[in-house]
Structure formats: structure tokens, C-alpha cells
Image (spheres, helix red, strand yellow):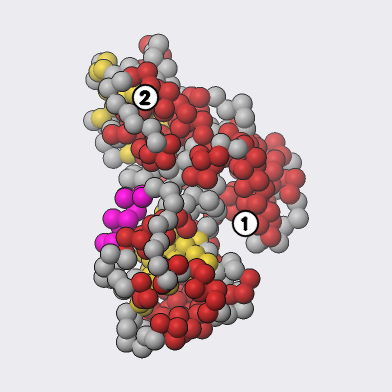
Amino acid sequence: MEDILRMFNPWWMGDFNPPGIIRTRYHDIMRSYLDRKQVIFLVGMRRVGKTTLMKHFIFELLNDVPPERILYVSMDHPTLQKASILDIEKEFRNIQGLSMMDKVYIFLDEVHLHPDFEIELKVLHDLERTKIFASGSASIFLLEKGAYLTGRQHFIEVCPFDLKEYLELAGITYDIHDTSPMIKNAEDHVRYGGLPEYLQSKDAGYLTDLLESILYKDILSRHSLKNIGSIKDLSQLLSQSVGNALSNRKIARILNLSHRSVSDYISFFQEIKLIDLVEREGKISVRKISPKKVYFTDNGMARTIAPTLNLGSLAENLVFNELRKSSQPRYLLSNGREIDFVFDDTAVEVKYKDDLLKRDLEPLLGSKGYKNKVMITRSREEVVKGIKLVPLYKFLLEGL
């Protein structure tokens, strides 16, 4: 085990400089929890960059913490699968000559693959001077497994790269006032999404292979299912329906599945952070019985499943993923007219074009109770009848 731990922790032996870009937003949150006792879980879909984020944070931490007090391990390593987390931590302290009273920082990647991880993390949390960061692909799965850690955990959802990170990774410098290049940059981001390894290679086969891995490992294998055909059919139907409201009953009818199967399969898709569902605005009875709108966590993944998705649907998908970082948007349906997103006192409609028609403005004009009315456009930036028109690229870089 010592050789494996040394392999995982090159900073014990010398310089360490991880590749990729620094995701400052997440570093700031992680640093704010350094002196708190909670176990910090980084959660999100596969290949969203959790491992790289951990290693960049370790690199930053080395400015303040001796290297011999920092341990990183990936729990999917075959040799470590039979070892307990407690045994790994004990071996780490023995290698570095640390007592049980010496504070250490442990980073456990893919911790959800380890059986009974929550019990062992509770022991480390309660009995030793150990600050724990852990990652996992399935956020809801981790939440369910977290009963032993109630009150002892904090979750940070790691999302695909936003436009700023997309441009930084590509080495693109930009001027937000230079409209034509900014439109192109935003549209490239809309099409490619934000999974870092794919952005570096632009190899479509990467996303296809990732999707297969997600469907087989995270859904079929974990839930002991055999009907891969139904799972693939559902993924295609959902991706083709980005931004549209679908009821489980309708999905069951289209795919010739039971209502229970559809409900279970969709919950599995949510569990692994492949999709999100948006409820209709209204009383709880309205929210629960009304069809929900479908959005994918990553645009590139959605377009891999449904290559014919148009730019307007993809733009709306990206707008949702930005909004949900700071709010809980719902869609509004009133008098037969729909507004894409409402939250607090804000209503947002996405129309990825500049030649707006009267009917495009009518839903926002007719909405009541929303002080801020915003329409996301391709490049138009002005105020029309109290509606603020905001270009997509400006929204992605500056927010509302």
C-alpha cells in the first residue's frame, strides 16, 4: 500500500504542478470550510472535473500545509478496494510518522465506490484530527448514504465549465464589447458544453464512450437492470425534449413502459446528475401534478444524444444551468402562455434571435408580479416596453 500512496501523492517527494485551470469559485468555497469540521463532498456528473479540482486545491493548500500532512487517494484503485479507509489513513500516518493528534488533510476521490464509506468517514470525523474532502459522481446516492453523517457533511456541486472557464481553458482572450467574436464564443460553448476533457480534445467519440459508461455503470449495474434498450430510448426522448414539459404518463405511453419504470428511470438520471427537472410555478399541488421541463447538465452530452437539437434549445439549456447555480427557477404557465423561468421577482424568457416579433414579447408583457423581466437574445441589448434584452454572451459572463 505504501507504494500506491506514494504514487498518488507526488508532493511528498518534490514539486507538484497539476494541469488544467484553477476554478476559483470552488476553491473559495472549499477554503471557507477548511477550519470547520464537516466532511466536504464534491458531487457532480462523471468527468465534470472533480479530480482536477481536488488536485488544484491541494496545490493551493501546499502554501500553508506541509506536504506530508496531505493525502490523496482514488478509491477506484484495485489494490485499495479491499482496504478500509481507516486502514489507508493509518498507513498514511505511519509512512509520515504522524501521531493521532497531528492534523491531516485527506482527499478521497470516488468515495462512493467504497462500501460503508459513510460509517468510516464518521469515525474519522469524530475521533481524529482529520479534515476530509471526498468526491462522488452521484449526488443523490451520496445524500441517501449520508445518514451516519447527518450534521457532519457539506455538499458542493461541481458543474461543467461556464463560459469564462471555457474561454480560459481554450486560451481565448476576449473583449465583451466586441460583439461578433463574443457571439461566436458563446455559440461554441453552447454547442460543445463544459466537460473539460472533451473541450481539450473535441473528439465526439469521447462523449459517446462517456455516455455508454454512465448508462451501464451508473444506472444498469448499480440498479441491477437489464433493459438497456429502454434506458437508451428514454435518454433520447429526454434529450430531444430539452426545454419542453413532459409528464411521466406521456413518456410511458411513447416508450411503452410502465409508469413506475419511467419514474424510476428518470430518478436514476437525476441521481447521476445527467438531467434536471423544472417544476411549474404555483401551489404545491400544481407543481407536483404538472408536467416537468427537462434540461441536461451538460450541453455537449445533450447534443451527443440528440445531434439535431437546435441552437435555441441548447441556449435555453445553458441559461437554465447558469440560473440554477443561484436560484431555483420554475416555469410559468398562465392563460396558455409560457415563460421559461421565474424565480423571486424575476421572469426570464430565452429567444435566441434578434428579429423579435410582438408574440415573442407577449408572455413577459402579460406576466404579473415580476418586477424584473428579462429576455435572453442573440445580440440585442436594449429595453423594450419594460423588458430588458440581454445578449446570451453577456448573461453568461455577467449574469442578470
Q: Main secondary structure of the magenta part?
A: helix
Residue sitting nearer the eye, 322 or 227: 322
In the image, taking residue 277 as reference, residue 238 lies left or right, namely right
Q: Residue 151 appears at what percent x and percent y? A: 35, 72
Q: Residue at x 50, y 24 (%)?
A: 311
In the image, taking residue 250 as reference, residue 11 lies left or right, namely left
**Which of the 4 image quarters holds residue 78?**
bottom right
Residue of label 1: 218
**Which of the 4 image quarters holds residue 328?**
top left
Which residue is most to the front? 14
Given the image, on which type of amino acid does mark 2 rest?
A: Met
Whether 185 is drawn above or below 144: the answer is above
Q: Quadrant of the C terminus?
A: top left
Residue of label 2: 182
Q: Residue 32 appears at what percent x and percent y? A: 26, 62
Residue stretch rendered in magenta on the structure: 22-33
Residue sitting nearer the eye, 7 or 46: 7
Q: Residue at x 27, y 22 (%)?
A: 177
Query: Residue 86, can we see it?
Result: no
Given the image, on which type of amino acid does mark 1 rest?
A: Asp
Q: Which class describes the residues within 10 Å of circle 1: few (<14), some (14-19), or many (20+)?
A: some
Residues tagged 1 and 2 counted as in contact (Cβ below 8 A): no
Numbered badge on residue 382: none
Name the element at disc 2.
helix
Q: Quick check: is 284 in the magenta stretch?
A: no
In the image, taking residue 59 as reference, residue 199 lies left or right, namely right
Whether 62 is drawn above or below 130: the answer is above
Name the element at disc 1.
helix
How far apart are labels 1 and 2 at the CA level?
37 Å
